Image (tube, rainbow, N blue to C red):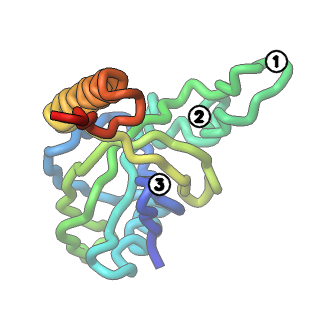
Amino acid sequence: VGCKVLPSGIILDLPLWRVQWVELPGFQNVLNVWQPHYTHMFEAVVAAPKNNWYFGHLHLPGGTESLGKEGSGLDWRKASAMEPSGLRTHAPVVGTLMQVREVARLEDGRLRLVVQAVERFAVLRAKREAPYTVADVQLLPDREACAPHLARAEVALADAAAGRAATATAAGEAGGDGAPQVEKGA
């Protein structure tokens, strides 16, 4: 049970908590969950092995009250003659992967959760909307975290290209096959 993370950074069957505020990677929060459909969702999340207690946090203008209303669905990839781009929703489709760190079940049925915002994602496909949204998502690498690695990769590629150019030049000077030329009769 729980979502499945593929090596490509795609997460299958991620439950989405769609509320009226945003979470940013790196931050922790305490959630007070009292709405029945989200209590149900989080009970399903924490029924999985603890290392798989993930859900997606997705901003929804107007919060839960907007669910089911025009433009709140995540059917944004279903292009039509009216919307050839495929964008048929006004709802955000980029959210934050969250991990439940602690759970407390309260006497009145509410859940109190300590959650950690992990990484950004983009919704690829909504699989269901009720009783809570479940979607396949693609993790989005943090540009700031990737920047040093990308700079090193660009230098390595430039060095490799320069090395190939030097080898090609040497091959041309050596007779075209890259083998060293040996003077005869010396």
Of circles 3 and 1, the one toward us is 3
Look at label 3 and name its amino acid. Answer: Ile
Where is residue 122? Give x, y as percent. 46, 40
Q: Residue at x 54, y 53 (%)?
A: 136
**Residue identifier under label 3:** 10
User: How far is mark 3 from mark 1, CA to CA?
Assistant: 29 Å
Say which element carries label 1.
loop
Where is residue 120? Give x, y as percent. 33, 41
Q: Compare marks 2 and 1 and give the one earlier in the sequence.
A: 2
Q: Compare marks 3 and 1 and give the one earlier in the sequence.
A: 3
Q: Residue at x 24, y 30 (%)?
A: 163
Would residue 113 be found to the left or right of residue 14 on screen? Answer: left
Question: Is residue 59 visible from the viewing direction of this image?
Answer: no
Say which element carries label 3.
strand
Name the one closer to the observer, 44 or 124: 124
**Residue identifier under label 1:** 82
Looking at the rendered structure, which numbered label has been put on residue 108?
none
Look at label 1 and name its amino acid. Answer: Met
Of circles 2 and 3, the one toward us is 3
Q: Residue at x 34, y 63 (%)?
A: 54
Where is residue 13? Give x, y as percent. 53, 62
**Residue identifier under label 2:** 72
Q: Residue at x 29, y 54 (%)?
A: 98
Look at label 2 and name its amino acid. Answer: Ser
* Label 3 crowd bin: few (<14), some (14–19), many (20+), radius 10 Å: some
Cβ–Cβ below 8 Å for labels 3 and 1?
no
